[in-house]
Image (cartoon, rainbow, N blue to C red):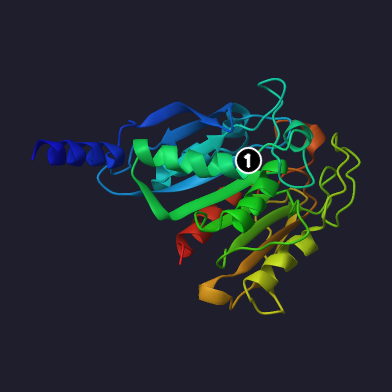
Amino acid sequence: MMPFLMFMAASMAQTDSQLSAGDHTRKITVDGRERTYLVHVPRKIDASKPAPVVLAFHGGGSNAEQMVRFCGLDEKADDAGFIVVYPSGSGRTEQLLTWNAGNCCGYAQHEKIGDVAFVRQLLDDLARVVRVDADRVFATGMSNGGMMAYLLASDLSDRIAAIAPVGGPMGTNECHPKRAVPVMHFHGADDKFAPLAGGRGERSLSQTNFLSVEHSVGCWIKANECQAKPAVVELPVQIEDGTKVTRKTWGGGKDGSEVILFEIAGAGHTWPGRKPPLLYLGKSTKNISANDAMWEFFQRHPRR
């Protein structure tokens, strides 16, 4: 009887919420390397119920702490009641980190860092300290981080329900998900780092020959078996800031999946709805909030 009780206690410890509301840092070892991720647990979360999780990947040459400020997802999480996780990439310094997302970027790519394995172990570790709804684990990211979200949709589709990359195309020519993964992509038409049409961005330090956004969404339209012709809507201009948002939706996909592209005329390498920290990144739009749009999208698309 005693061993059984000990087993039950250990099992409960694995699932009960151990992280309180607030911000936390976790460290795990993956392939002999210490990896770090930040966790934001909202105040309104019900610790007795499994919670949705949004993985938010920083851009190349950035880090998790900067991503917290850049995207502003903590505020949305506090309002909506989901956990946000900010993984840290790899690099020679803690401030300039990258992801191995295929054809980009930097240290992580050169060293062939296993970032998909990192995320898989991260999710396992996270489930030990908070109650995670395994059917509602989502990924977003900026630039190289958006590329990482695409890679996870292909190579970790058993764990990732849907993705919403921002300013980052696919880093691989093909996608091979085990199941349909809904995609929502945001991209500035005036992006000088990862151009909408692909190629080398004139302001990109990595000088990566990026794949086009058309190729990226096209891969997922095919993989998800969506309709070939999109429904196109020009969103009303609510604030005259020199930007205009066009939404293209390829619906009718397998298991209710869809692919949505927000193409933002006049916007650069920025997070829609957020003020860019550097003018060098280009203009952002106030005519759509990426955080609001992606959360509404994620709510529609649990893992099926």
Q: Horizontal and vertical percent for residue 295?
A: 50, 54
Choose between 240 and 4: the one closer to the eye: 4
- Which picture quadrant has residue 271? top right
Q: Residue 249, relative to residue 15: is it above or below? A: below
Choose between 37 and 237: the one closer to the eye: 37
On the image, numbered disc 1 is attached to which residue? 115
Residue at the top extreme, as displayed: 93
Residue drawn at x 78%, y 35% as measured from the top left = 110
Describe residue 135's horizontal placement relative to residue 67 as left or right. Answer: left
Q: Horizontal and vertical percent for residue 251?
A: 61, 75
Residue type marked 1: Asp
Residue at the left extreme, as displayed: 1
Q: Quick check: can you spot residue 116? A: yes
Residue drawn at x 58%, y 28% as measured from the top left = 32
Describe residue 173's horizontal placement relative to residue 250 as left or right. Answer: right
Residue drawn at x 49%, y 63% as measured from the top left = 301
Q: What element does badge 1 sit on? A: helix
Choose between 235 and 13: the one closer to the eye: 13
Q: Quick check: can you spot residue 248? A: no
Please identify the quadrant where the N terminus is shown.
Answer: top left
